[in-house]
Image: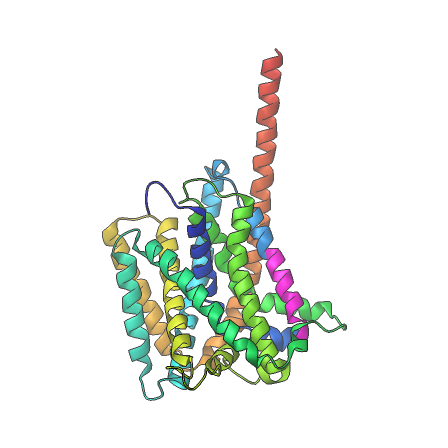
Amino acid sequence: MTSPGWNAPALIWVVTASVLAGGLFVWPLHIVLVAGQNADLALVAAWCWGGLIALFQPPRDAVRGWTRRLLTALDSVALLGIFSLDCIVLNQLATMLQSIYYYQTPKSALVLPLVAVIGVAVNRTPVSVWRMVTFFVPVLIVLSLGIFGLALVNLHHPRAIFPIPDIALTTILQGLGIIAYVGVPVGITLRRASARMAEQPTWRGRLVALALPAGFLGVVYAITMGALGPAALIDLRWPVVFVLDHVTLDSTFFLSRIGIVVVFSWTLGVAMGLAVHLRLLWAVAPVRQSVRVIGSTVLLGIWGGSALVLNSPTTSTYLLLRWLDPMATWYLVVELAVLIGIRMVWMVRGYRRESTIGTATDV
């Protein structure tokens, strides 16, 4: 982390990496299972909730004393959920690679090298992760947009992208809850990354930082839903991978299938996101470099071991939906309530301060 501070684009790339790392593997399967073709309405509701989280982030002047301690406790709970989600992400990534691309490769050969690379990247220098994120994430976004453009030729069910007239509020709320885990990194990343910026980001800057990963997930949903339709989508474990892997190019081109590009971008994106999550830990609990290296090694070992212990993606998905999702939902409710409360207290104090100054001036 540099002393002059980050610029606005750095906040966008860091938030994008943090949010997308855990949001792709079961995306958008379970929201369609719950909300059906009205899943896009649940997405709009989720984006509105994320927008509130971004808008009510406390200003720097308000983060001191009891406010700082309260936000630290809130961020600690968020990190616990994020790290649990990262174990599931690594398991899903390794299982996906093993099932689709590397059939005879042991899972340990897919997980452990990736964990080791993340550890080296995180512990090199305090700024190494941020430099890699600000370089690789824009490249991955541009590369993904190119792949999405090629995937448009497979959009055989465009009507499925739009909601149906029969709108059931219950299913929309269930769809909102089923993707609660995606929203957990939003608040903590905005708070801790904003503290590293040269200037406090405006509310517009925070909304833009949230809009990029939200829009990315929306495009992924539209392409997957439009290519497969709701009936076929719910029968695939990794519908996004299936759709992108079946994008074909002209046979005269040097690469007729872009599956290897999908594998590379997916793996690199997960690595960037997990590295950001590790750095968020040391932003919440600053320690010496030696303690940081030991702590990172232990946590990476837990990630890798958990990914290997989970015997199937069915088990990890069950843990995600049965245990993590309900806790994530409650966390997001509490987080928004805390942020609104802090903002109101800060505004009341500012009003009283101005009133006191005005009274003293009149005297």
Q: How is the image coloured?
A: rainbow
Q: Position of residue 136 (x, y in %)?
A: 37, 62
Q: Is residue 327 visible?
A: no
| Nearest to the observer: residue 246 or residue 209 | 246
Residue beneath the point at 58% across and 37% down: 345
- From what the image shows, is residue 336 above or below residue 202? below
Magenta stretch?
A: 36-49
Decide whether the magenta segment is chiefly helix, strand or loop. Answer: helix
Residue beneath the point at 63% across and 84% down: 231
Outermost residue, front side: 252
| Nearest to the observer: residue 126 or residue 256 | 256
208 vs 115, left or right, is right
Tally of numbered tags? 0
**Residue 199 colored magenta?**
no
Residue beneath the point at 53% across and 52% down: 208
Q: Position of residue 223 (x, y in %)?
A: 57, 74
| Nearest to the observer: residue 361 or residue 308 | 361
